[in-house]
């Protein structure tokens, strides 16, 4: 089980590298294939960094925001619950790409605010965070609802307040329930960062397309694919570790 | 002293009237068993008494302190602060234990005394260990609930309730989720508690146990108390026909 990601990388690389060699028409000589490969990586690296940044910041903002939306969704007040429900249904029911466009162009069309390159980065993060928060909210909700009523009752009889019950009893059990769907969501996010091209945010996929077009060579796109793939192997590995750690008690 | 006093409690779920005018009082040191057919409202009564369910009408008092008063036929609950204090007078042991699965046995027992009663952790831990010793499971302190048998889990649940030093302890069918061998483990613990003069109200289907251990038996049917008294009277010579029919069926 443990060695699987590594094996996958090796298989993937061993398929990719010969393909690259042939596609570059390299037969030794100018030391080209490997050099070219690293050249592409260097060219892509700023995009990789942008993708990573987008990924990390989206998670940092959307995970807590999702918890807030989840609380609103579970509010005792019908009006608040409805607003949260509507928010979630819109975020999940419309394309992320469209949401990014709205966040990016919205201020311009609504308030005639000038579009800056700087805002492009913020718009991407705001759009992603708002969207992913909706998904996380629903995941959290399912996790909270998986905690049996008896846990609340036992806590209440022992004198725990509502907040204490949530923090000490419900939340830790929720975290365990939600780890698998959260892992799925994070893996999707890794790939979804490429959607930021919609607002011309230059992340790695955008760069790969440009280089590919300029060199009229498909290989940069494969390198980009390899990047997402390895990224997700790392995500799966880390989440697997966390899941194992949270498994200290089982049901 | 009366530890618990319930007067004229009424409770309905939508159109279903589950408790129809029930009054009970329990003296310090008394062990009371509640018997009755399924659906007669036994659990609902305990849940109202432990404030897991809000009652519609009637009064509820612990140690002379009013938790619920009756204002022209409607139950009115005392302010939050009083309820918080009154909450400490009683404990409840559930049919399916409801231990916290992410806490070890020891943490299940000491967490509430330490963080809610704000007691000294070292002292509470010593008491918890001595409770576990009494229950015969001191070697399980660092286990998680899922690593224990049902009987052991229920003993932990009882220890958890006792660690809060309640004046009165309620049990809702504490052995129903257990097979016969494990049932006798729990009944042994309850006998021990009874011999230590712990005040207890036990909903049970264990007729023999109720006869041997309780000072008083209450028989409920369709939301009423239909008979109550000394176990030898209620169980061996019931006056009410429905009690007789129920006992005949249970004794087989
Ligand atoms: N939360 C609820 N909502 C609606 N009806 C309920 C609820 N709780 C209990 N009831 C109903 O109230 C009646 C009494 O239930 P209760 O659980 O008090 O009976 P019981 O005497 O404890 O029965 P058992 O011996 O099976 O545990 C039942 O008809 C039950 O369906
Ligand atoms: Mg019941």
Image (tube, rainbow, N blue to C red):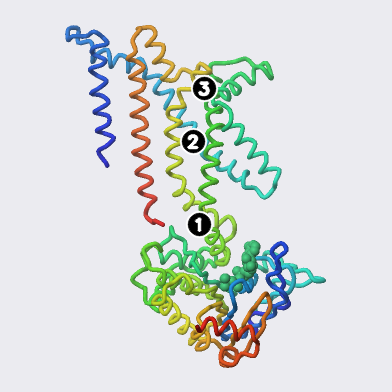
Q: Which residue is mark 3?
A: A121
Q: Chain of mark 1?
A: A
Ligand 1 falls in which quarter?
bottom right
Q: Which residue is mark 1?
A: A169
N-term mark: 2 or 3? 2
| Pick the front one: B40 or B109 | B40
Residue A226: % across, % down: 33, 24
Disc 1 to disc 3: CB gap under 8 Å? no
- The nearer-to-camera label among 1 and 2 is 1
| Direction from residue B88 to residue A184 in the image, left or right | left
Disc 2 to disc 3: CB gap under 8 Å? no
Which quadrant holds residue A230?
top left
Residue at the (51%, 87%) spot, across then down: B213
Disc 1 to disc 2: CB gap under 8 Å? no
Q: Is residue B43 visible?
A: no
Q: Same subunit under labels 2 and 3?
A: yes
């Amino acid at each position: 089980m443990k060695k699987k990601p590594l094996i996958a990388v090796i298989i993937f690389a061993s398929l990719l590298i010969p393909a690259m060699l042939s596609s570059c028409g390299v037969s030794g000589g100018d030391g080209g294939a490997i050099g070219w490969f690293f050249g592409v990586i260097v060219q892509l690296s700023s995009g990789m960094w942008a993708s990573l940044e987008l990924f990390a910041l989206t998670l940092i903002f959307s995970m807590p925001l999702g918890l807030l939306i989840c609380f609103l969704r579970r509010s005792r007040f019908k009006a608040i619950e409805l607003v949260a429900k509507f928010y979630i249904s819109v975020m999940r029911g419309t394309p992320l790409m469209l949401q990014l466009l709205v966040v990016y162009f919205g201020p311009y069309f609504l308030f005639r605010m000038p579009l800056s390159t700087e805002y492009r980065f913020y718009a991407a993060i705001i759009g992603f965070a708002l969207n992913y928060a909706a998904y996380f909210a629903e995941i959290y909700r399912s996790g909270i609802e998986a905690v049996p009523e008896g846990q609340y009752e036992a806590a209440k009889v022992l004198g725990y307040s509502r907040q204490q019950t949530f923090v000490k009893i419900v939340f830790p059990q929720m975290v365990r329930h939600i780890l698998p769907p959260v892992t799925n969501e994070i893996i999707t996010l890794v790939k979804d960062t490429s959607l930021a091209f919609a607002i011309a945010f230059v992340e790695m996929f955008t760069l790969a397309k440009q280089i590919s077009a300029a060199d009229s060579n498909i290989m940069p796109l494969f390198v980009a694919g390899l990047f997402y793939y390895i990224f997700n192997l790392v995500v799966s590995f880390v989440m697997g570790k966390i899941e194992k750690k949270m498994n200290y008690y089982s049901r | 002293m009366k530890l618990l006093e319930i007067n004229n409690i009424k409770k309905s779920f939508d159109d279903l009237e589950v408790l129809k005018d029930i009054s009970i009082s329990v003296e310090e040191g008394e062990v009371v068993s509640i018997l009755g057919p399924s659906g007669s409202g036994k659990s609902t009564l305990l849940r109202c008494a432990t404030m897991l369910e809000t009652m519609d009408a009637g009064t509820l008092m612990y140690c002379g302190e009013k938790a619920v008063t009756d204002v022209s036929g409607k139950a009115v609950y005392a302010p939050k602060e009083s309820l918080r204090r009154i909450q400490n007078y009683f404990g409840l042991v559930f049919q399916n234990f409801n231990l916290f699965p992410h806490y070890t046995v020891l943490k299940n027992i000491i967490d509430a005394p330490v963080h809610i009663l704000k007691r000294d952790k070292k002292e509470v831990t010593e008491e918890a260990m001595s409770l576990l010793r009494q229950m015969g499971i001191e070697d399980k302190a660092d286990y998680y609930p899922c690593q224990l048998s049902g009987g052991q889990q229920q003993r932990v649940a009882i220890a958890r309730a006792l660690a809060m030093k309640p004046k009165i302890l309620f049990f809702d069918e504490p052995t129903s989720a257990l097979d016969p061998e494990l049932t006798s483990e729990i009944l042994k613990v309850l006998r021990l508690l009874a011999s230590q003069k712990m005040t207890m109200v036990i909903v049970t289907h264990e007729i023999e146990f109720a006869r041997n251990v309780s000072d008083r038996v209450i028989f409920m049917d369709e939301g009423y108390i239909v008979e109550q008294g000394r176990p030898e009277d209620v169980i061996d010579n019931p006056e009410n026909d429905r009690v007789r029919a129920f006992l005949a069926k249970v004794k087989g």
